[in-house]
Image: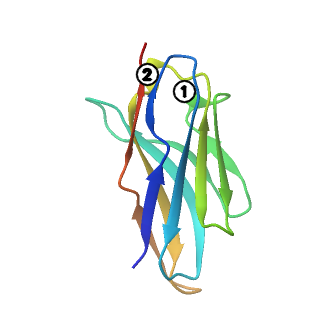
Amino acid sequence: QVRLVESGGGLVQPGGSLRLSCAASGSFFSINAMSWYRRAPGKEREAVAVITTIGITSYVDSVKGRFTISRDDAKSTVYLQMNSLEPEDTAVYYCNMDVRSSRSLSQTYWGQGTQVTVSS
């Protein structure tokens, strides 16, 4: 069984920074794409950032230039560095990984979510 554990959320003032981490544990072959999603109050979940196995990244327009996604495959971990945070970034953030159990089989896993609150 694969488990994703997130950390790094909290309360920060506008303009501040936070770094989220998400580590995968359990038995698996490798990890394909790693992503971060968020769900703001009263809104649907949206994809924030994704990173492929070769390091290609993509971001939702609202965070471009402020957020950076990265991965450390040796630690089975994905990070989200969030700078210049705005109140609109307030949400529960979830990590998502496409985990390979073998060369031909993969399954998507989700973290438990971590709250990010941007407020003065």
Q: Left or right of 22: which side holds 56? A: right
Residue drawn at point x = 31 percent, y = 37 percent: 44
Give the image location of residue 27, x and y in percent: 50, 83
Scheme of colours in the image: rainbow
Q: Hey, which residue is sitting farthest top in the picture?
A: 120
Q: Is residue 40 above or below residue 118?
A: below
Give the image location of residue 116, x and y in percent: 42, 34
Give the image location of residue 58, x and y in percent: 63, 44
For badge 1, the amino acid type reads Ser
For badge 2, the amino acid type reads Glu
Q: Left or right of 28: which side holds 108? A: left
Q: Left or right of 7: which side holds 41? A: left
For the N terminus, the image quarter is bottom left
Residue drawn at point x = 53 percent, y = 62 percent: 23
For the C terminus, the image quarter is top left
Callout 2 secondary element: helix
Give the class, few, some or many, for how many residues have Cα within 10 Å of label 2's Cα (few <14, many ≥20).
few
Residue drawn at point x = 64 percent, y = 66 percent: 75
**Which residue was labeled with disc 1?**
62
**Which residue was labeled with disc 2?**
88
Give the class, few, some or many, for how many residues have Cα within 10 Å of label 1's Cα (few <14, many ≥20).
few
Q: Is residue 6 above or below residue 83?
A: below
Disc 2 to disc 1, how far (Cα)? 9 Å
Q: Are marks 2 and 1 in contact (CB under 8 Å)?
A: yes
Give the image location of residue 83, x and y in percent: 62, 28
Q: Earlier in the sequence, mark 2 or mark 1?
A: 1
Q: Is residue 93 above or below residue 63?
A: below
| Disc number lying in front (2 or 1) | 2
Q: Left or right of 120: which side holds 23? A: right
Q: Nearer the viewer, residue 87 or 101?
A: 87
Callout 1 secondary element: helix
